[in-house]
Image: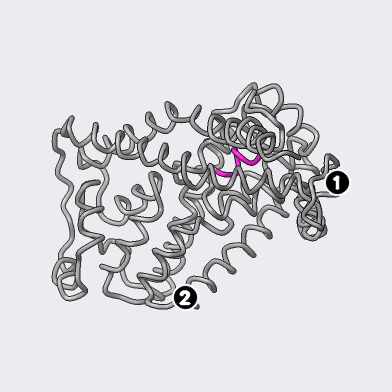
């Protein structure tokens, strides 16, 4: 294939579908960030709830702020649980899949996924506290969005110990419009930046794997492509969850770079960000039961690379985050398995 034609196909079949497919979710994400920031800045949420609320926006600052928790076991547990809070990057996955497979009540399905993550966090903290494994969960001071981001980057351990001795009091206050505007703008600009960096690179990588065979030659037959080969290796592992399809597996693997990349990968594999093209392909991959199982797995499995780096910075080593991520993925597989087969029995 001529080089000029290759560039044209990458632009039209990878970059355009992948990036535009993700950017279409910016209004939804902006609304969610606005509401979450409004809750936090008004003072209605304090202590560890404020930290987990930060996780709804992005896990990275919430994980980073865990370094200010003096008790090691408490710090490790909260860092382990934060990725179970659905960050804004996972929202496009839920919106896309629920609107296709549960068009009568997509909001309720999305709410169930969010609620599942919250229940896992709450049950884990409750159990750990009453078993005496950690200190009281109410150990964090109430901080605004801006303060969390700022403090997470420059707090030293000595300062953290004195900072965390007291408990924050619930004091309602009038949210600053500037803070609300800055939070929404920062999140949306960060999302756009990811679209033109990480997601763009992931989209191009998916296209290359989809169009090259094991000899690194162009092939029009996707079943002979590198992507199909990689997907087939993992098919037996994911088949019990209901989505043992190379396309779903490829999206999950690319999603380790960033969760938004799962949507862009589907768009690249479908050849278009158009909802009809995506719907046709996803209906070929999932049933309603396996689609819900897939969303649960996306909620619980390995968070993004940036979260891994944040965990490494908190723990001071790479081994501990890798153990945490392995446990999260095993837990994701087990719960997705139970949910998929439970739904099949009910239906």
Which numbered marker is on residue 223? 1
Residue in the foreground of this view, choosing between 269 and 41: 269
Q: Does the magenta segment cover residue 248? A: no
Mark 1 crowd level (few <14, some 14–19, many ≥20, 10 Å Cα): some
Q: Is there any visible trace of residue 197 in the rendered image?
A: yes
**Which residue is painted at 68% across and 59% down in the image?**
333
In the image, is 310 to the left or to the right of 71? right
Colour mode?
one colour
User: If the image is split into quadrants, where does the C terminus sit?
Assistant: top right
Residue 312 in picture, x, y percent from top left? 41, 70
**Which residue is painted at 61% across and 44% down in the image?**
204
Asked if the residue at tag 1 contacts the one at tag 2, i.e. Cβ–Cβ closer than 8 Å, the answer is no
Residue 191 in picture, x, y percent from top left? 42, 39
Q: Is residue 276 above or below residue 138?
A: above
Q: How many marks?
A: 2
Residue 266 in picture, x, y percent from top left? 66, 38
Q: CA distance from mark 2 to mark 1?
A: 36 Å
Q: Is residue 141 above or below residue 259?
A: below
**Which residue is painted at 69% across and 47% down in the image?**
208
User: If the image is split into quadrants, where does the N terminus sit?
Assistant: top right
* Span shown in magenta: 261-265
In the image, is 48 to the left or to the right of 102? left
Which numbered marker is on residue 8? none
Q: Which residue is mark 2?
A: 318
Mark 2 crowd level (few <14, some 14–19, many ≥20, 10 Å Cα): some
Dominant SS of magenta comes to: helix
Q: Is there any visible trace of residue 78 in the rendered image?
A: no
- Residue 12: image quadrant is top right
């Amino acid at each position: 294939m001529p080089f000029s034609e290759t560039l044209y196909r990458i632009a039209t079949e990878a970059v355009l579908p992948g990036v535009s497919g993700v950017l279409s979710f910016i209004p939804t994400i902006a609304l969610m960030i606005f509401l979450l920031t409004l809750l936090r800045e008004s003072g209605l949420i304090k202590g560890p709830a404020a930290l987990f609320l930060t996780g709804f926006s992005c896990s990275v600052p919430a994980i980073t702020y865990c370094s200010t928790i003096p008790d090691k076991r408490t710090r490790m547990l909260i860092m382990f649980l934060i990725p179970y809070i659905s960050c804004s990057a996972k929202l496009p996955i839920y919106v896309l899949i629920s609107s296709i497979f549960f068009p009568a009540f997509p909001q309720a399905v999305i709410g169930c996924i969010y609620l599942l993550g919250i229940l896992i966090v709450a049950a884990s903290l409750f159990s750990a506290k009453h078993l005496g494994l950690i200190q009281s969960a109410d150990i964090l001071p109430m901080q605004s969005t801006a303060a969390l981001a700022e403090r997470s980057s420059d707090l030293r351990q000595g300062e953290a110990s004195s900072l965390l001795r007291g408990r924050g009091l619930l004091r309602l206050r009038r949210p600053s419009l500037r803070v609300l505007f800055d939070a929404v703008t920062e999140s949306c600009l960060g999302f756009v930046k990811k679209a033109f960096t990480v997601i763009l690179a992931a989209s191009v990588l998916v296209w290359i794997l989809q169009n090259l065979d094991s000899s690194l030659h162009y092939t029009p037959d996707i079943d002979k492509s590198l992507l199909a080969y990689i997907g087939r290796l993992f098919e037996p592992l994911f088949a019990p969850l209901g989505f043992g399809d190379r396309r779903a597996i490829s999206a999950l693997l690319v999603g380790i770079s960033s969760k938004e990349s799962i949507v862009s990968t589907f768009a690249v594999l479908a050849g278009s960000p158009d909802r009809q093209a995506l719907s046709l392909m996803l209906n070929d991959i999932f049933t309603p039961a396996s689609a819900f199982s897939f969303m649960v797995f996306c909620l619980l499995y390995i968070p993004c690379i940036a979260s891994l780096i944040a965990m490494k910075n908190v723990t001071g080593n790479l081994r501990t985050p890798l153990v945490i991520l392995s446990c999260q993925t095993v837990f994701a597989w087990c719960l997705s398995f139970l949910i998929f087969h439970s739904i099949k029995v009910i239906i």
